[in-house]
Image (cartoon, rainbow, N blue to C red):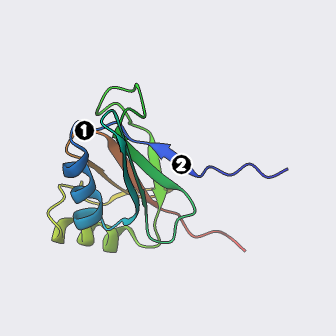
Amino acid sequence: MDWKIELIFIPVTDVDRAKAFYVDQVGFHADFDSQVSDELRFVQLTPPGSACSIAFGTGITEMTPGSQRGVQVVVPDADEAWRHLHDHGVDATPVDEQPWGRFVTFTDPDGNAWTLQELPPRDA
């Protein structure tokens, strides 16, 4: 049986600010934005090439804004990812070289932390 992660909730304080950050600066695709009621708004975004999306809004999670600290995304090129973030005004760490990969980290306006990893070459 396959188990596939398809949606990760990101707790934010300002939905419009978060959407602009993730779409305009980070480069995620805006899939869905629905104001269901005064108490419920659901926004879904997907990183380019990903089968897993993120969601935020109002009335959809009880997590404290900024408390999501463990999302890691695999990218083909850490230098290119850093350049993209930097060129779009995202404060990202320089590429961190480790034996298990190359890493770039950044936070969204609420402090939710992201790690981007370029995997090391695999022996054939």
Picture coordinates of residue 50, whole percent (x, y): 52, 65
Tell which residue pokes out farthest to the front in this image.
37
Drawn side of residue 74 relative to residue 12, left or right:
right
| Residue nearest the observer in this picture, 85 or 23 | 23
Picture coordinates of residue 106, whole percent (x, y): 27, 50
Picture coordinates of residue 79, whole percent (x, y): 32, 71
Q: Which residue is mark 1?
A: 111
Q: Is residue 47 above or below residue 62?
A: below
Drawn side of residue 11 relative to residue 55, left or right:
left
Identify which amino acid the numbered label 2 is placed on: Leu
Question: In percent of the image, x 29 and y 58: which residue is there?
Answer: 22
Identify which amino acid the numbered label 1 is placed on: Gly
Q: Is residue 85 above or below residue 39?
A: below
Question: In percent of the image, x 23 and y 66: which residue is there?
Answer: 24
Question: In percent of the image, x 18 and y 66: which residue is there?
Answer: 86
Tell which residue pokes out farthest to the right in this image.
1
Q: Secondary structure at mark 1?
A: loop
Counting residues from the start of the chain, the first of labels 2 and 1 encountered is 2
